[in-house]
Amino acid sequence: MRSTKRYGKKIDLALNVWVKLTRAYVTFHKLSEENIRSFGLTGPQFSVLESLGHLGPMTTGVLCKKQLVSGGNMTVVIDNLEKEGLVERIPSTEDRRAITIRLTPKGKRLFDEIFPQHAEYIAKLTSVLPEEEQVKLAELLKKLGTTLAARF
């Protein structure tokens, strides 16, 4: 029999939410990453292609903010995508420090080919919940994330 230390109803509930959210995220992320690797890409490479494919060219700084990574990490990811001919760097004519990253035609073709497949896979993963529960979960997660970001 497992002994459980109790911290009080409010804290026990918060810890229960935290554990379940973390376990669900880890499992979902692992499955998503496996699917991404099947395309011959890393998670960060796929994320860059996805951002550029949906939002268009953007500076390295904006890309870092969207991906929640440092400039050093992003440089390595972009270097590797550039070596594969999937993205290109375009120096700014107004600001020598600014570099815009955009998909090459090869990168656009790859994005157009693989993103719909990955989206279908994500839909398959979320289909373990009925549609109404998916909507509610998305609302609750957004509320949790935006409220925490505003407070802390």
Image (tube, helix red, strand yellow):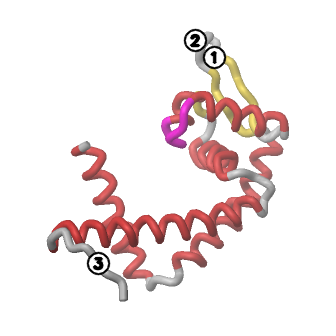
Question: Is residue 67 one of those drawn in magenta?
Answer: yes
Question: Is residue 113 one of those drawn in magenta?
Answer: no
Q: Which residue is drawn at 83% across and 44% down?
A: 106
Which amino acid type is shown beneath numbered disc 1? Answer: Ser
Q: Can residue 53 be seen in this view?
A: no
Q: Which residue is drawn at 30% across and 46% down?
A: 149
Residue 77 higher or lower than 89, as above or below: below
Rounded to the nearest whole Å, what is the CA distance between mark 1 and mark 2? Answer: 5 Å
In this rendering, which labeled residue sits more in front, label 2 or label 3? 3
Image quarter in which the N terminus is found = bottom left
Q: Please state the horizontal and vertical placement of residue 43, each as a whole percent of the image.
A: 66, 52
Rounded to the nearest whole Å, what is the CA distance between mark 2 and mark 3? Answer: 59 Å
The residue at which mark 1 appears reads as 92
Question: Is the Cβ of the residue at disc 1 closer than 8 Å to that at disc 2?
Answer: yes
Q: Residue at x 47, y 69 (%)?
A: 23
Give the mark nearest the N terminus, 3 or 1: 3
The residue at which mark 2 appears reads as 95
User: What's drawn in magenta, residue-wise?
Assistant: 65-70
| Kind of element beneath mark 3 | loop
Q: Is residue 68 visible?
A: yes
Q: Please state the horizontal and vertical placement of residue 70, each as a whole percent of the image.
A: 54, 32
Question: Is the Cβ of the residue at disc 2 closer than 8 Å to that at disc 3?
Answer: no
Which amino acid type is shown beneath numbered disc 2? Answer: Asp
The residue at which mark 3 appears reads as 4
Mark 3, other Cα within 10 Å: few <14 / some 14–19 / many ≥20: few
Give the mark nearest the N terminus, 2 or 3: 3
Q: Residue at x 31, y 72 (%)?
A: 16
Which amino acid type is shown beneath numbered disc 3? Answer: Thr
